[in-house]
Image (cartoon, rainbow, N blue to C red):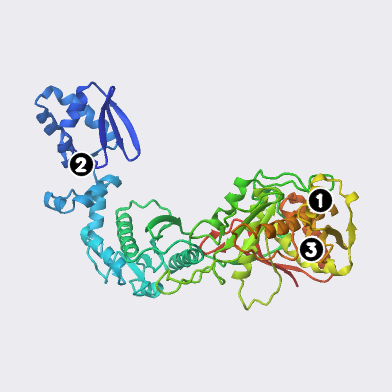
């Protein structure tokens, strides 16, 4: 029986025998103290490949054969030794093995069948298209592993788009023989992006969308650009390693790319979404949203809390901070997300919790490719920030994320789209549709009448009274509340108006006068609190709040949202109108969006 020790295996003597570790696993081979001496004497032979007979001969005692056979069988079973008599693929001859020591060590470490993988790597033909430091680094890596270039019939092609030698990745891929997979590399002036291997033009466009988003993160952030040519050389080296992993079959199976960024030339693995097979926008039917079981459509699991009807706490929240971050993780993930959390450490969190989120993505469809040369150097331009607020950080974070989604809908919507409507977002489709229709109904509610005053004696809730008192006594902003109604709709629209200037500080919908008043006071307090903090806190400026808000939808039970949506649909039908909506279901850099958003209108 011939065996060989895997290069990443290590051993050490312990009281109960020999401790072994390899590939993140460890175990103890039990035996007397002399067992380690037996193994240690054979390490060099095991590393080069040996046999049981040779090991027994080296021990100098045929009586050692049962022990040697036991040790070898145990180590083969633990995948520490390679059974050379059972492997697939031809074993390399000594001269070939000496010429590819590092390649064989890599394969013997990472492959279950290293010599089959060695034959596959040696038979591969690669094409490297492009120029610059990254392309040269790829070529050096291929040459070191004995992989020849063959532009005519490549097994795999590496396409290098360098900012100094731009390459049209899609055009270059189209010139290759049909079916040739490609590994794209973008070596920009500010950052570099490597991989993953793309099987077709759709997957290559997905890479370009991620590249464009990574360039947006670099453009809108404060991190220094990656130093060239070091970043390009590193990108090329990483691409060479990715080629080897592809040919050897050691890929982990995930569609990931590597970002090379920063003055220190760091690397970070990011997820690349599966290439979209359908349109980013899909029509939505309000009746389908209403017939869907509320519990089945609600995406926040057990995070349902108190409602907002009369007699319940209007400050209750059905969200928790971990749940909000799970929902928002795809939207705010560095390098691929459409937004980043703001630096809110200096923002006061009393009386209202405040969270900011800044937009990263450029206007236009997320699938639009980056400029030639990858992430080219551009003048930094921080995207607009949006303010979220609530009775706790979780609620404030959710408000900020939904505002970001509404902003993204406006960015993604085609300029020639003449169907009207407003941008809206929600935890569920029903939440999103109600958000859009309530925002559209707001101006009508405000113009139908001057509204009725909401006075102190009506506010039996301590949370509402506390906010009203703080506005007047702490912030010195006297506020009057007025409630507005629409026929056929139980929800109320409440405005918070500055008594001295007449300025409308906030207008918020709620399922009752009390909850609408609380939402309006909360939004007004957040606005005043943030304005006061701007004088001392180094925060980025935020976009003005929407003229009509629907914060109460974020804490309302799903059945209440369905009831509101049903009434909004029936009102539209009475007026001879029909709700129309299109949902933005995916972002090319994020993948499927975790929350519902799109435009909603009446026709």
- The correct choice, above or below, for 294 with respect to 223 in the image is above
Q: Residues within 10 Å of mark 3 (few under 14, many from 20)?
A: some
Q: Earlier in the sequence, mark 2 or mark 1?
A: 2
Quarter that holds the C terminus: bottom right
- Name the residue tied to disc 1: 469
- Name the residue tied to disc 3: 569
- Of tags 3 and 2, which is closer to the observer? 3
Residue drawn at x 53%, y 69% as measured from the top left: 381
- The correct choice, above or below, for 113 with respect to 178 in the image is above
Inspect this view and state whether residue 354 appears: yes
Calculate the distance from the C-alpha at mark 3 to the C-alpha at mark 2: 73 Å
Mark 3 falls on what kind of element? helix
Q: Which of 282 and 212 is in front in this view?
A: 212
Q: In x, y percent, where is residue 146?
A: 20, 59
Q: Earlier in the sequence, mark 3 or mark 2?
A: 2
Calculate the distance from the C-alpha at mark 1 to the C-alpha at mark 3: 38 Å
The mark found on residue 489 in the picture is none
Q: In x, y percent, where is residue 141?
A: 25, 60
Q: Quadrant of residue 499?
A: bottom right
Q: Relative to residue 496, is residue 145 drawn left or right? A: left
Q: Nearer the viewer, residue 322 or 304?
A: 322
Mark 2 falls on what kind of element? loop
Mark 1 falls on what kind of element? helix
Q: Quadrant of residue 235?
A: bottom left
Inspect this view and state whether residue 562 appears: no
Callout 3 touching callout 2 (CB < 8 Å) = no
């Amino acid at each position: 029986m011939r065996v060989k020790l895997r290069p990443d295996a290590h051993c050490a003597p312990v009281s109960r025998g020999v401790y072994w570790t390899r590939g993140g696993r460890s175990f103890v081979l039990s035996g007397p103290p002399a067992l380690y001496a037996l193994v240690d004497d054979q390490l060099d032979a095991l590393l080069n490949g040996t046999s049981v007979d040779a090991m027994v001969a080296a021990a100098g005692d045929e009586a050692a054969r049962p022990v040697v056979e036991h040790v070898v069988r145990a180590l083969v079973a633990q995948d520490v030794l390679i059974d050379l008599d059972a492997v697939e693929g031809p074993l390399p001859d000594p001269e070939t093995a000496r010429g590819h020591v590092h390649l064989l060590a890599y394969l013997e470490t990472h492959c279950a069948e290293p010599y089959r993988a060695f034959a596959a790597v040696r038979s591969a033909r690669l094409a490297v298209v492009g120029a610059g430091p990254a392309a040269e680094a790829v070529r050096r890596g291929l040459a070191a592993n004995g992989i020849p270039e063959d532009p005519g019939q490549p097994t795999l092609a590496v396409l290098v788009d360098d900012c100094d030698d731009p390459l049209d990745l899609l055009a270059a891929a189209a010139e290759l023989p049909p079916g040739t997979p490609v590994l794209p590399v973008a070596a920009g002036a500010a950052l570099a992006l490597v991989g993953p291997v793309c099987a077709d033009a759709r997957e290559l466009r997905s890479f370009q969308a991620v590249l464009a988003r990574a360039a947006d993160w670099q453009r809108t952030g404060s991190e220094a650009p990656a130093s060239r040519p070091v970043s390009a050389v590193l990108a090329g080296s990483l691409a060479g390693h990715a080629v080897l992993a592809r040919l050897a079959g050691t890929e982990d199976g995930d569609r990931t790319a590597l970002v090379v960024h920063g003055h220190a030339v760091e690397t970070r693995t990011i997820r690349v979404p599966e290439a979209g097979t359908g349109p980013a926008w899909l029509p939505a039917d309000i009746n389908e949203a209403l017939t869907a079981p509320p519990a089945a459509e609600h995406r926040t699991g057990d995070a349902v809390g108190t409602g907002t009807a009369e007699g319940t706490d209007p400050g209750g929240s059905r969200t928790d901070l971990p749940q909000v971050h799970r929902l928002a993780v795809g939207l705010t993930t560095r390098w691929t997300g459409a937004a980043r959390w703001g630096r809110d450490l200096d923002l006061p969190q009393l009386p209202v919790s405040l969270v900011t989120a800044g937009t990263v993505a450029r206007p236009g469809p997320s699938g639009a490719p980056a400029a030639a040369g990858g992430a080219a150097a551009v003048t930094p331009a921080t995207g607009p920030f949006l303010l979220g607020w609530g009775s706790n950080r979780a609620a404030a974070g959710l408000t900020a994320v939904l505002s970001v989604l509404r902003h993204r809908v406006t960015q993604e919507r085609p300029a020639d789209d003449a169907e009207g409507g407003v941008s809206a977002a929600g935890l569920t489709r029903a939440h999103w549709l109600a958000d859009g229709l309530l925002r559209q109904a707001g101006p009508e509610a405000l113009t139908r009448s001057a509204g009725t005053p909401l006075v102190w004696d009506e506010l039996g809730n301590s949370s509402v009274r506390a906010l009203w008192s703080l506005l007047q006594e702490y912030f010195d902003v006297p506020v009057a509340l007025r409630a507005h109604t629409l026929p056929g709709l139980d929800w109320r629209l409440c405005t918070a108006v500055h008594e001295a200037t007449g300025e409308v500080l906030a207008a918020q919908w709620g399922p009752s006068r009390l909850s609408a008043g609380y939402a309006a006071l909360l939004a007004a307090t957040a606005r005043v609190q943030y304005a006061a903090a701007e004088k001392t806190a180094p925060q980025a400026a935020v976009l003005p709040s929407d003229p009509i808000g629907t914060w109460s939808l974020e804490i309302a039970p799903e059945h209440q949202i369905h009831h509101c949506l049903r009434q909004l649909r029936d009102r539209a039908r009475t007026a001879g109108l029909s709700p129309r909506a299109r949902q933005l279901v995916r972002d090319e850099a994020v993948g499927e969006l975790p929350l519902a958003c799109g435009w909603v209108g009446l026709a």
